[in-house]
Amino acid sequence: MHRTLSLVVFFFLSFPISAAGVKVGVRDTDNSVIKALQEGKIDEAIWRDEVSGCSPEGLLRRARLARDDRKFGDALCYFEAYLQYFPFGRLSWTDQVRKQWTEVATEYVELLARTDGEKVAWFKPSIGSIDAYKEIQQCFAQKDAAKYTRLADEILAKYPESIFVQAAILTVATGRSMHGHGGGFQSGEHILADYLGRMQAKGIPERDQLLVKLMRDERARHSSASSGRRSEPPSEQIPTSPRPRGGRLVPGRPDLEPEKVEVRQAPEDPRQYRFSSFNPFVRREALKERFFETASSGNVEAAREHAKIYLEDFPPEFRREPRGDLTHAWLAAKQPEEAMA
């Protein structure tokens, strides 16, 4: 059975929450895929969705078909699943992805306005900012960086609970750092770090900063690779216990002072927030990436532990394909005995 997202699916015990608290709502339905999504069983939903494996394109197509059939409850659930699980792995805010996300979010909010929109806390801020967000997309196409930046700042300031906040920020960072809008290529890492500070000042929860953090880290990696810089952990000189090189410790004798050794403190893995992310696709991608790195480095003991963590994120009945990922990685790392374990 074809499953488009087999490499990054994830099972978790509680409903994950994405942009501004969007999650698949509990509505009456006889659709087995939607029932699995409502219960937070993404692996089961993908298994039941034999046609598209709950791919982003598949979710959008099903949402539109349900809406056209006037099955508004089903349509809302499919739209919510897309927004809840975006970016379905590693974030890539390309023009195609940006346009697709924009279509999903705007069509979802507009449909919600016709149904049960008043029941969600972020509905009014999203309705209030939808026109400004649409205008941002128009300004982006016109390369008007000054105007789309002003509009994004306005959404963040006036409607911090809107589902459009992060997408507006990603659009600004993409235009100014990757397309040179505004007359030059600015540092995407710095733009996004500044926005994160402002989001935190507005009290936006960390879960609703995820997309901005992902792009900030991606731009930071790109900047480091382009400049040839390497991130080195901070180090400090820490004296050992007094062990004079020539005998007794004598005050005022530099040649008999304690030896000093350089101690490098291991930095926190910058992917830590991804390892514990509420978004199953983001978390699974990070865990898999960490395992591949440790297996490739020859650190077999650490790789075994990372493989175990990666595999156990799947429910037992859905571990066949991720176990295959591990096997291929072990073989690529020239560890056939681990691949057969």
Image (cartoon, rainbow, N blue to C red):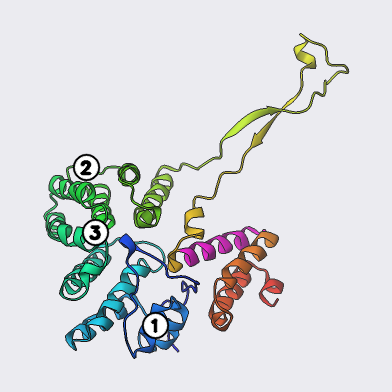
Height in image: 185 above or below 116?
A: above
**Numbered label tally:** 3
Quarter of the image that includes the N terminus: bottom left
Disc 3: which residue = 164
Height in image: 143 above or below 40?
A: above
Label 2 and label 1: CA atoms lie apart by 41 Å
Q: Residue at x 78, y 10 (%)?
A: 253
Tell me which segment is drawn in magenta. Answer: 283-299
Label 1 and label 3: CA atoms lie apart by 26 Å
Q: Are marks 1 and 3 in contact (CB under 8 Å)?
A: no
Instruction: Say which of 124 and 194 sits in front.
Output: 124
Q: Is residue 294 visible?
A: yes
Disc 1: which residue = 53
Instruction: Say which of 296 and 115 sits in front.
Output: 115
Q: Are marks 3 and 2 in contact (CB under 8 Å)?
A: no
Mark number displayed over residue 318: none
Q: Residues within 10 Å of mark 3 (few under 14, many from 20)?
A: many
Q: Is residue 289 left or right of residue 296?
A: left
Decide whether the magenta segment is chiefly helix, strand or loop.
Answer: helix
Amino acid tagged 2: Gly
Q: Secondary structure at mark 2?
A: loop
Height in image: 108 above or below 166?
A: below
Residue 65: horizontal and vertical position, in percent? 22, 85
Disc 2: which residue = 184
Q: Residues within 10 Å of mark 1 (few under 14, many from 20)?
A: many
Q: Secondary structure at mark 1?
A: loop
Amino acid tagged 1: Gly
Instruction: Say which of 127 and 213 sits in front.
Output: 127
Q: Secondary structure at mark 3?
A: loop
